[in-house]
Image (tube, grey):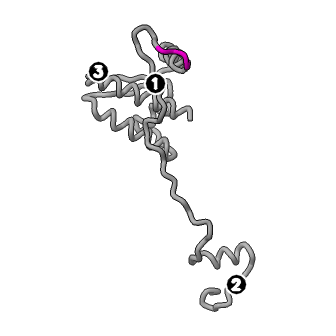
Amino acid sequence: MNNDAEYEALINGLKIVLEMGVRNLIAKSDSELVVNQVNGGIQARGPRTELYLRCTQRLITKFKEARLECVSKEKNSNADALAKIGSQMKAVLLGSIPLEIQEIPSIPEIEVMQVDEVPKETWMTHILAYIHKGTIPEDKFKAR
């Protein structure tokens, strides 16, 4: 879930600078994993992370030139301070920068396919029965 927050911050930042009309961008993050996934060095694992990665890459293609760089946590103190202020429920304004609470994720919810609880017979059914219970079907063809 921590990577979700990193992706959310990146996605929202990309949206803001696109609205401002920025065409060339160097974005910096202290999340080495997210930077490497976006830059193609590490494959995204899991359907949720894959959705975040695709959303980020879609936004990056809207820039004339964009680059994502990794910075150490020590060099990212200004961003951390903004994140802490933004996470306070009572914070409404930071100077002239309005803060808002994001109620829903930037990515769609993952649909889960329902699986029947009653297993249907397949070519593996008799093999599994033999392995687990030692039973052999009466039908010679199936037994073979």
* Range of residues picked out in magenta: 88-92
Place of residue 73 in the rendered image (x, y in percent of width and height, measured from the top left) = 53, 19
Question: SS class of the residue under badge 1?
Answer: strand
Q: In this view, does 52 lie to the left or right of 87?
A: left
Q: In which quarter of the image is the C terminus?
A: bottom right
From the image, which quarter does the N terminus lie in?
Answer: top right
Indicate the position of residue 138 as horizontal and vertical percent values: 68, 90
- Residue occupying the point 60% across, 90% down: 141
Question: Mark 2 or mark 3, which is nearer to you?
Answer: 3
How many neighbours does mark 2 have within 10 angstroms: few (below 14), some (14-19), or many (20 or more)? some
Residue 62 location (% of width, % of height): 28, 33
Q: Which numbered disc, 2 or 3, marks the residue that appears first in the sequence?
A: 3
> Can residue 75 be spotted in the picture?
no
Task: Residue type at mark 1: give it.
Answer: Ser
Q: Residues within 10 Å of mark 3 (few under 14, many from 20)?
A: few
The three-letter code of the residue at mark 3 reads Met
Which residue position is annotated with label 1?
Answer: 29
SS for callout 3: loop
Which residue is rendered at x = 46% and y = 24% of the image? 29
What residue would you read off at disc 3? Answer: 20
